[in-house]
């Protein structure tokens, strides 16, 4: 399995991005407090808010991600064949069995989340289970299990919450700050502060792209191919997912990086800003692994 060094690097990134978010909110708190004459008390309140957000992100990010996706836990008696497929893969690769969740939509996608391996979750859509063969499903699940083994899912889940909270703060200040005063100079300054806050949303999206690099998906594809036993299983699954045009409800810009494939279909801007590598390139690399017997 992946080295412990990569897992430690992911854990370090979690704290790094928490520190960045706290610093952003602290600086904004200073300017807002100064402008509205709140003084150091106002700045302290902003820092306390940042601390609370950090706490929520660290301990409850997986819960928020599951809730936002609409995923529901499934039991073995509901889908015995799917459970057997996942259990056999886990036993064969000596991986702890994750909890299995289902997103009730015809769209085809999947993600992994959880604070650690003991609390890991793999969520798949109903459409994915209905439209893929068992071999293709094993390729998708193998990809998600590789994220779990590498500790990727905790980093990605925490970043979802941090990005979401900063976006909420930006939007709320933008709408509440504008028009607070009829004084032209005052309103102009508020507009500038609101504009700066509104710009934080794409900045945090960029931070996500930096943290969850496209190389991470290539690594998960390669390891997932090893876990499922054949890279063509995942290649075939990705090809079908790529051609699926059903939008995924519940997915947002803050959580898009969690999924095995970009959940936004046919949007040029979404493709441009996607944290995922080009699907055709992923498929080609998997097919070359099979031909050249490399990476397995």
Image (cartoon, rainbow, N blue to C red):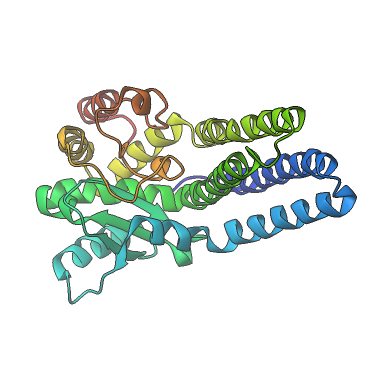
Above-or-below relation of 59 to 5: below
Q: Quadrant of residue 54?
A: bottom right
Residue 232, position as x, y percentages in the image: 18, 36
Decide if residue 264 is on the left or right side of residue 54. left
Q: Quadrant of residue 27?
A: top right
**Towards the viewer: 38 or 110:** 38
Decide if residue 271 is on the left or right side of residue 4. left
Residue 79, position as x, y percentages in the image: 17, 69
- Residue in view at x 76 percent, y 27 percent: 185
**Towards the viewer: 140 or 184:** 184
- Residue in view at x 77 percent, y 44 percent: 29
Quarter in which the C terminus is drawn: top left
- Residue in view at x 26 percent, y 65 percent: 87
Is there any visible trace of residue 227 in the rendered image? no
Q: Outermost residue, bottom direction? A: 77
Residue 288, position as x, y percentages in the image: 24, 24
Is there any visible trace of residue 215 in the rendered image? yes
Q: How many marks?
A: 0
**Towards the viewer: 78 or 54:** 54
Above-or-below relation of 79 to 247: below
Q: Outermost residue, right direction? A: 40
Residue 39, position as x, y percentages in the image: 89, 48
Decide if residue 77 is on the left or right side of residue 147. left
């Amino acid at each position: 399995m992946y080295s412990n060094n990569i897992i430690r690097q992911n854990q370090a990134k979690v704290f790094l991005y928490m520190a960045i978010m706290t610093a952003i909110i602290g600086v904004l708190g200073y300017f807002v407090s100064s402008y509205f004459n709140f003084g150091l008390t106002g700045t302290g309140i902003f820092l306390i808010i940042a601390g609370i957000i950090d706490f929520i992100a660290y301990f409850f990010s997986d819960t928020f991600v599951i809730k936002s996706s609409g995923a529901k836990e499934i039991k073995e008696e509901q889908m015995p064949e799917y459970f057997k497929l996942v259990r056999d893969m886990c036993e064969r690769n000596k991986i702890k069995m994750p909890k299995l969740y289902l997103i009730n939509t015809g769209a085809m996608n999947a993600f992994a989340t959880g604070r650690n391996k003991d609390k890991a979750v793999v969520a798949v859509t109903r459409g994915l289970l209905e439209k893929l063969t068992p071999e293709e499903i094993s390729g998708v699940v193998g990809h998600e299990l590789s994220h779990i083994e590498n500790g990727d899912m905790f980093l990605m889940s925490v970043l979802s919450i941090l990005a979401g909270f900063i976006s909420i703060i930006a939007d709320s200040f933008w709408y509440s700050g504008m028009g607070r005063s009829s004084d032209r100079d005052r309103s102009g300054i508020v507009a500038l502060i609101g504009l700066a806050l509104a710009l934080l949303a794409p900045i945090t999206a960029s931070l996500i792209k930096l943290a969850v690099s496209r190389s991470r998906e290539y690594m998960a594809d390669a390891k997932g191919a090893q876990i499922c036993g054949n890279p063509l299983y995942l290649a075939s699954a990705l090809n079908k997912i790529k051609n699926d045009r059903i939008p995924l409800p519940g997915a947002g810009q803050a959580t898009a990086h969690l999924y095995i494939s970009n959940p936004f279909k046919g949007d040029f801007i979404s493709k441009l800003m996607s944290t995922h590598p080009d699907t055709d390139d992923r498929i080609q690399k998997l097919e070359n692994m099979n031909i050249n017997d490399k990476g397995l």
